[in-house]
Image (spheres, grey):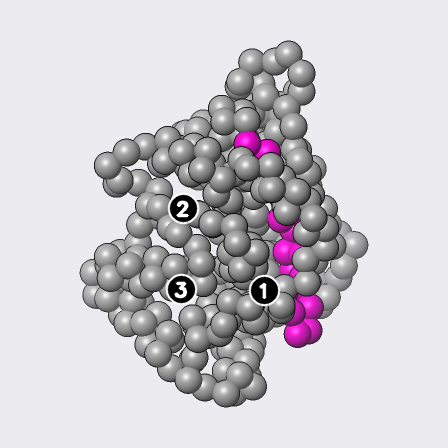
Amino acid sequence: MSRLAESLAAAGYLAGWRLVRAMPKPMAAALFRIAADRGARKNGKGAQQLRVNLRRVVGPKISEDEMELLVRDGLRSYGRYWMEAFRFPSIPLKTLHDTLDMANPELLDKLHAGGQGVIVALTHSGNWDHAGAWAAYRAMPVVSVQQRLKPEVLYDRFVAYRASIGIDILPLTGGDRSTMDILAERLANGQVVCLLADRDLSSSSIDVDFFGSTARMPPGPARLSVRTGAPLIVAQLWYEDGVTAGNLVGPIVPPPDVDERTAVAAMTQQMADAFADSIRAHPADWHMLQKVWSTDLPTDLPAALPAAQ
């Protein structure tokens, strides 16, 4: 992306945080729905990739006409995420907590009450920021990791946005110390580490079976758990009419008497299985507009680690 394009994109996001939060919610919702429907009709690269991804999720059981409606609904769900992101800084944390209908909250409460931190793996589904705000309101210090964005002012604004709803952000790269080491320290201090984990194209990614085909996912959540002893759980999220809904699954544990590499691979596969259960049940709320499966990826990417056997 050129510097001009980056600057224009940043200006759009910054304007969104000023303008959308000032609108009445019905007006904002209508505008984002119109934009989503227009995106579905234009069928740009994001919509095309979403269609490919969702077809892998639902298989051949739905017709092409039904698939077009699913893609439209997926873009509407993605638009809802952005509308909420722009509006959340002006919403009290208690309201954010009360508008997330989380099943099995006692799983996180019990694990966190033990004094050690908890690792929560999530997909790009529903509103993952909402889940962080929900945990923060329950007096759990929440930390996550974010890629650096260009221009830097945009990255800073996303960090400020997430701080406003109780989520502390670490940069994925470019820090003075290893992000993994910092997260381990945060876990030792009882913090909740929330990590988006449904896509990774780096050389450290792990091949997993995902809806019957090979996909690449990050080893970070499982590796942190193995190295620190902190429990790893999965937050499954989706949208319902007036709320974000969710379910907590886990803990995910390694098989006994194996080395770290085998443990991490096995746990990452378990994590992928929990992701798939939720995405299968709520495909329109999986906002994955990028390539995930290995057969869709360029052939010159670094190889991933093999799947757990």
Marks 2 and 3 close (CB-CB < 8 Å): no
- Which badge, 1 or 2, is on the more N-terminal residue? 1
> Distance from label 1 to label 2 (Cα)?
21 Å
Q: Nearer the viewer, mark 1 or mark 2?
A: 1
- Identity of the residue furthest to the left in this view: 3
What residue span does the magenta drawing correspond to?
230-248
Per the rendering, the mark at residue 77 is: none
Q: Secondary structure at mark 3?
A: helix
Per the rendering, the mark at residue 145 is: 2
Q: Is residue 246 magenta?
A: yes
Residue 150 position (above or below residue 260) = below
Amino acid found under the numbered disc labelled 2: Val
- Which badge, 2 or 3, is on the more N-terminal residue? 2
Reading the image, the residue beneath label 3 is 164
Q: Residue at x 40, y 64 (%)?
A: 164
> Distance from label 3 to label 1 (Cα)?
14 Å
Reading the image, the residue beneath label 1 is 97
Q: Is residue 213 left or right of residue 15?
A: right
Q: Nearer the viewer, residue 209 or 149?
A: 149
Q: Residue at x 49, y 30 (%)?
A: 224
Considering the image in quadrants, where does the C terminus appear?
top right
Q: Secondary structure at mark 1?
A: helix
User: Residue 54: x percent and y percent?
Assistant: 64, 54
The answer to whether residue 51 is visible is: no
Q: Nearer the viewer, residue 77 or 108?
A: 108
Amino acid found under the numbered disc labelled 3: Ser
10 Å crowding of disc 1: few (<14), some (14-19), many (20+): many
- Identity of the residue furthest to the right in this view: 61
